[in-house]
Amino acid sequence: FPSFSYDFLPTSLYRFYSVSQDLFGLLVLGAIAFAFYRRLVMHPERLSGDKLEHSDAYLILGAIAGLMVTMFVVNAIELALDPESLTRAKPLSLALSIPLQSLPAGVLAGAHGVFWWTHALLVLAFLNYLPYSKHLHIVSSIPNVYLSNSQGPGPKGVIRFLDLEAEGVEQFGAADVDQLTWKDLLDGYTCTECGRCTAACPAHITGKVLSPRKIIIDTRRRLMEVAPLLVGDLSELAHHALVHGEGDEGHSSVTALVEN
């Protein structure tokens, strides 16, 4: 957009912005490298104990790394084309631009277009992928925390009493997502899948198979499976459930949804 410029900013403020962009870009790449090392080499139990698929995390980490790399290359090419630009305040980009200055201007201009569009398309692709990935928590976490005490009176963090001896109660707990509250379902879309809840769970620590992380993730996956009811695709949904599989009475809740 040739008509746009940062000329309205004081020079000192723009230099600060330039330095911070390079600094945080480098920090992000370092964090991504450690995240890959942790998942591929360290294998912490809280991230792999429930044998969940890691491809989502690898895809997201790779996309963010691609954004940082293309950003650095675009800045370096701009500096190679205009060494006296104010962008010189970006130390890493300036260092990367030095070996590029020997290339023809036409080659640099073409490469700039390739990396600029790669960066932009990565951003747009990630925005489209966001609702289908665990990174939806970027959008849902703030309203979810704000609404965290919306399920009735009482102090935050206190589990509501469940009277297991109450007469006339046909079911305790929930067998499927239609028996959960909207807040329970929003929790599923807000989970970052970090596994800290499982790592701190007293039952899991004693060797029990319970994984709070897996419960939340299974809730989200089951909700996404039931979602086609809204658009009329009812095939096979009645043969599964959040708690029980095919052949168990736990699928009756979904059967009721289909019949309705």
Image (tube, grey):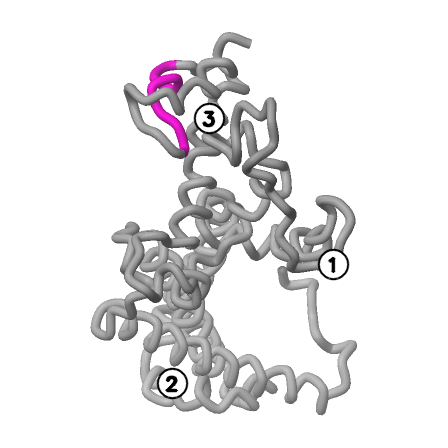
For the point 48% across and 33% down, the residue is 223
Depth-wise, is mark 2 or mark 3 nearer the camera? 3
Farthest residue to the left: give it.
41
Q: Position of residue 1 (x, y in %)?
A: 62, 60
Q: Residues within 10 Å of mark 2 (few under 14, many from 20)?
A: some
Residue at position x 23%, y 68% in the image: 40
Check disc 1 and give the amino acid type: Pro
Q: Residue at x 72, y 52 (%)?
A: 149
Q: Residue under circle 1? A: 155
Q: CA distance from mark 2 to mark 3?
A: 50 Å
Q: Which residues are magenta?
A: 235-242
Q: Earlier in the sequence, mark 2 or mark 1?
A: 2
Q: Residues within 10 Å of mark 3 (few under 14, many from 20)?
A: many
Give the position of the C terminus as an image quadrant. top right
Q: Main secondary structure of the magenta part?
A: loop
Which three-letter amino acid code belongs to the residue tagged 3? Val
Residue 260 is tagged as none
Q: Position of residue 192 (x, y in %)?
A: 48, 58
- Residue 86 appears in the figure: yes
In front: mark 2 or mark 1? 1
Residue 176 is left or right of residue 205, and the answer is: right
Query: Which percent across, then down, holds residue 91?
Result: 48, 91
